[in-house]
Image: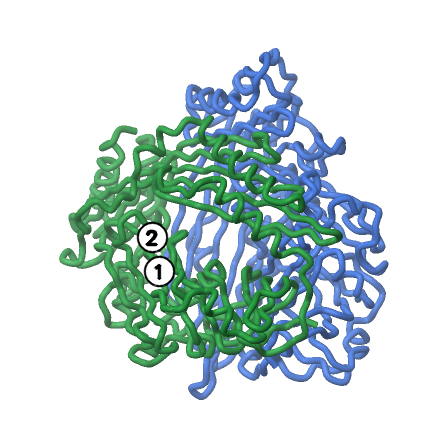
Chain colours: A green, B blue
Amino acid sequence: MSDNHLAELARDVVKRALAAGAGDAECTASEGDEFSANVRMRDVESLKEAGSRAVGLRILIGKHTGSSYTSDLSAEGIERLVKQAIELAAVTTEDPHAGLPEPEELGSIPGNLCLYSDDVAQLETALKIDTAKRAEDAALTADPRIFNSEGASFDTHTGRHIFANSRGFAGEYRSSYCSLAVAPVAREGESMERDHWYTLARGFAGLEPPEQVGRIAAQRALRRLNAVKVETQKVPVVFEPRAARTLLDNIFEAVHGMSIYRHESFLAGKLGEPVAAANVTVIDDATLPGLFGTSPFDDEGVPSRRTVVIEKGVLKSYLLNCYAARKLGMKTTGNASRGLTGNAGIGHGNLFLEKGARTPEEIIASVRNGFYVTELLGFGVNIVTGDYSRGAAGLWIRDGELAFAVSEVTVAGNLKDMLLGLETVGSDLEFRGAVAAPTLKIGEMTVGGR
Amino acid sequence: MEFSESIFASRFQITRLDLEHYLAEALSQGGDYADLYFEYLLTSSMSLDESIVKSATQGVSMGVGIRVLAGERTGYAYSDDLAPEKIRKAARVAAYIAAGPGQPGKFDLHEGRKHNLYPVVTAPTETDFPQRVELVKRADRAARAYDPRIFQVQAVYADNLRFVLVATSDGILSVDRQPLARLSVSALARQEGGPPQRGHAGGGGRVELDFFLREKTPEHFAAEAAREAVVMLDAVDAPAGEMTVVLGPGWPGILLHEAVGHGLEADFNRKGVSAFSGRIGQKVASELCTVIDDGTMSSRRGSLNVDDEGHPTQRNVLIENGVLRGYLQDRLSSALMRSESTGSGRRESYAHIPMPRMTNTFMLAGESDPQDIIRSVPKGLYCANFGGGQVDITSGNFVFSASESYLIEGGRLTRPVRNATLIGNGPEALKYVSLVGNDLRLDEGIGICGKEGQSVPVGVGIPTIKIDRMTVGGTA
């Protein structure tokens, strides 16, 4: 579809919805092209390529909402889209807090956010396959114990996102990414372990060298070999950045505006109170150019921004869309998020924990007997209570050094205590996706094993 | 339903000849096999929060996925536009994977055998909205009425109706109409200003709307969610370390899904990256354990008349009396392993490449009285309900999180304990099964299985079982 056609369609859908009886309407349209190349054991395993488009509509009649979506963009398809949303407003309940943002809240941040790189759409298939092969080959040749592979993948995506509403907002942006991932398998005796490593960027030029990605993936798999299960004990736990990032996912859920107004978060009602150690500052910033949580406006047409969530341990802000803000008597933080349709949910921009002064080596050296977590398994986090219990694998720290591999154990505690007991924040913050954290050390957790 | 009566023939005017042409285009560069997967999907959902029906959504998506296999290689392309020129273009993109002489374009498409597991006359998606909305309202009222300590209730009802057409260069032509519906309820309880606790329940299947009016009502799920939330108000810290664990019947069958199911999917075993690779015929569980994956159960969430490659689903024995019997096969892996498809080729949608997946996975009943099983444990943990689970198929380590569990002390259930993750190793964990109950129960129809970014509906089931040794991830 031509550049402006889809944007025109979105504005037209809003107009049609108003003509059909809606008091307000918002339309999301998106289109994208995806490509994926997988290689395994140095041969092409699969190639996938396709493009798609779809449109979603949400309307209000009074304070009743209705939503619909379609991938059928024919005239009949669009007519049906409008009719379906209108029809559903008759079955939803009047919700006094439902509504669009106020006109003065709408807008888009200026400047080039570097979300789109021309080179992605122009990459030759042969180059993509070759990049994946180089990464896998580097992993396979890194060590004789790397005996197998789940393959390497090179993926690209380019797309366009459009949003228009009946309060006069119409915005759009293009985005692109490419990513390279490798998953080698290591074996020694009876022990078999896999791990993976990856790089991603808005453009091809931003990717890390494929050989480096392959070598890191191999090292990660190798260091897991011959893992043992340790005794059950309470010890300091160090989360490497890939594992530490999941704690930020937990914090996100806990400051999620919808969970706050429903009282289903252990951080509900704690604004202004210390909820973490004084060395913890958590920021959500959707304005950082080129990163993966960046956008000019959120999914309600509110400009993106930087929000300090936790400052020096004190809870400063929840993450809100207009609905949660109204429920709580606050203002939106520009964190509305949704797929094509439905009421807006809440998402994050670039959510990160600010880096500290200590290197990861110094943090490991500070532990006499403890657990260095490199992987977490499962869903054992209860945001209502903060109860935390997950499967884990990693390395045991003895006398300040990584001593041996550990697996088939659990790490458990409560997020309230874990955040307050966060002793050390590492200096190794890097963005490998929209959520990032440096190495983190928590004073004490229960490791469940033998 | 036959092809000529399907929406693809009637509304989109697709003919057998068209299908043969598209297959010929897909194999125009060579290759061993090609298939077309047409999908037309209607979805709707309604959600209630704070006693307000805050959201209702319906939508339609459609498309066709085209796959070409050449040895171990897969070429895949899809189109969300069913215009003939768009389909032919997708076929040419998928064809790129192969490099060789084109295949002669003659495919004797025939409609083969398939099950009739969900003879649903009117799918829930085709009913009036007010009666579906009433389900979430009833759930809300019932959960609040269950106990005055319930202070928040969320209820979501969602259904979909999927029309699929599979045509393959092997000559398979198959159409199916797949209804699916689910109601879930989540409740929060609080007492005397203390911290809240959550309970959750839900279920459904490939059923008529009547299922929620007669068999499993909104009140049933609401009471279950509210009960769990209220029980958890008195929970103590979970224990930590190795102990005897008793799993209750039903949803705890997720143990089988994580511990053995994923590790037996043929793609991992063909590549030799599963902890179960090369272990067919070996003992991987106690002889009390027989584990089945059955896609042919009537009206179940994980059932399918035909899999997403056009093969009829079947009842597959994975473990028989403790011995590993077979893998779950799709077209690609079975051809490369010189085996047969087990009707396990599934995909999330037309935009996804099929792979071996589970359907309804369960353990056959044993002979023990469930009460006797609990009485046999001096000290341990009884798990009545679970949240989700996950597995690392290479090391075989798996976890699943208990959402409702109790201490067993002196052969009796004493106090409820807080949420804890249990962890084990796939080829080892079931060797410690020492008692299997006579009370096999299947879950109520709520499971979603994720693999390589693709989600599909599944079922699980298990009788009460005693595992002599398993690591519990508590804090006490």
Label 1, secondary structure: give it: strand
* Amino acid type at mark 1: Leu
Residue position for label 2: A293
Please rate how many residues cluster around mark 2, counting C-alpha atoms within 10 Å: few if below 14, some from 14 to 19, many from 20: many
Mark 1 → mark 2, Cα distance in angstroms: 8 Å
Q: Nearer the viewer, residue A437 or A90?
A: A437
> Is tag 1's residue or tag 2's residue first in the polypeptide sequence?
2
Of all chains, the one bearing label 2 is A
Find out whether the residues at labels 1 and 2 contact each other: C-beta distance under 8 Å: yes
Residue position for label 1: A351
* Amino acid type at mark 2: Gly
Of all chains, the one bearing label 1 is A
The image shows residue A370, relative to residue A39, as above or below, that is below
Question: Does residue A200 appear left or right of residue A324 in this picture?
Answer: right
Residue B93 percent across, percent down from the top left: 48, 23
Q: Quadrant of the N terminus of chain A?
A: top left
Which quarter of the picture shows residue A274? Answer: bottom left
x 73%, y 71%: residue? B246
